[in-house]
Image: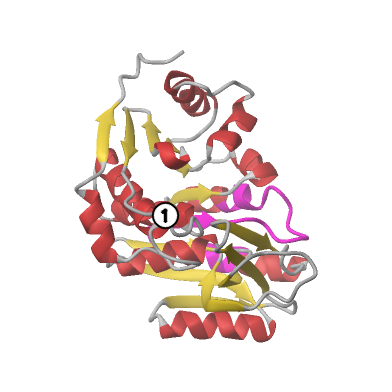
Amino acid sequence: MTRVRTLTINPALDLSAATEAVTPTEKLRCHDVRRDAGGGGINVARVMARLGGQVEALFPAGGPVGETLARLMRQEGLAYRLIPIAGETREDFTILDESAGRQYRFVLPGPVLDEAEQATFLAAAAAGDFDIACASGSLPPGVAADFYARLAERFHQTGKRFLLDTSGPALRAALNAPVDLIKPNLKELGGLTGTGLESPASQLAACRSLLRDHPLKAVALSLGPDGAMLVTEQGAWHARCQMTRTLSTVGAGDSFMGGLTWALAEGLPPEDMLRVAAAAGTATVMTPGTELCHAADVWRLRDLVELREIPLAATA
């Protein structure tokens, strides 16, 4: 079985709750409180494990919050390796305003990692026996923008496949590194290519330009309610899954990445990878707060995904 390692350099303890209405200065009484181990790569690992994949999560953690995060991982039966750090693991908060039907998300920056802690993480990330690495999430304070690019070089030297889901300077710095797949959204893709992305043809053209100009093998483009696109050197596909209900968008992108990574590890062709990824992302949107997708929903929705191949000539 193909082994996967997920990498989360900036994990979080995700808290979610609901309140009747969000108003200033008032005490907001909350209910439906839940706590989940979070951060991009950790969420990818949680989804992969639910789908039956063989996965290990690697992340730094410190302080009482880090201890709680590790306890939640153990309770979920997840394989993980924790790199101890001096700083306190961050917390993120999601609040649902029930009267307005709006969700508010508060994301903290995370602890500063010193040079020794970063070096320990880099060494641990490349060590051991695995086939695919998936790094997902933001960089914490003190970590240089080329962190993921350096990881990509290490994985390339040992013949391991590397998938990356990040944004901003970290994503731009990784473009010239040997990354197998990146997962930008429309805003991020426009920032990378400097082009307008109003039409599917222009979106496809932008993805193909990244493949042409950088050592990438695939681009998975998140389109929000309009689905997602997967573009490789061999072909391009678009997938969309009709949602029956929308409860929370938290973790949907990570779940998409979890489904995609699971399908890659299973050896599925690109179009089926996209189908599973779209189903996983949609299944997560149907769950409340910081909850992620359930396997039964993923398999049910997989058969409902509208998938079509896009002719490579259909570019602007």
Q: Kindly tell me whether residue 261 is visible in this rendering.
A: no
Residue at the image position 69 percent from the left and 43 percent from the top: 169
- Colour scheme used in the picture? secondary structure
Q: Is residue 143 magenta?
A: yes
Q: In which quadrant of the rendered view does residue 236 lie?
A: top left
Q: Where is residue 105 in the image (x, y as percent from the top left)?
A: 63, 60
Residue stretch rendered in magenta on the structure: 122-151
Residue at the image position 58 percent from the left and 53 percent from the top: 151
Q: Is residue 67 magenta?
A: no
Task: Report whether 109 appears left or right of 163.
Answer: right
Q: Position of residue 256 (x, y in %)?
A: 40, 52
Task: Report whether 233 appears left or right of 169.
Answer: left
User: Please, is residue 25 above or below residue 241 in the view?
Assistant: below
Residue at the image position 58 percent from the left and 84 percent from the top: 68
Secondary structure at numbered mark 1: loop
Q: In which quadrant of the rendered view does residue 305 lie?
A: top left
Residue nearest the observer in this picture, 133 or 297: 297
All told, the count of numbered labels is 1
Q: Position of residue 123 (x, y in %)?
A: 59, 66
Q: Kindly tell me whether residue 275 is visible in this rendering.
A: yes
Local crowd at mark 1 within 10 Å, few (<14), some, or many (≥20)? few
Q: Where is residue 251 in the image (x, y as percent from the top left)?
A: 48, 59
Name the residue beneath numbered marker 1: 246
User: Please, is residue 105 above or below residue 29 in the view?
Assistant: above
Q: In which quadrant of the rendered view does residue 17 lie?
A: bottom right
Residue at the image position 24 percent from the left and 47 percent from the top: 268
Say which amino acid is labelled 1.
Answer: Thr
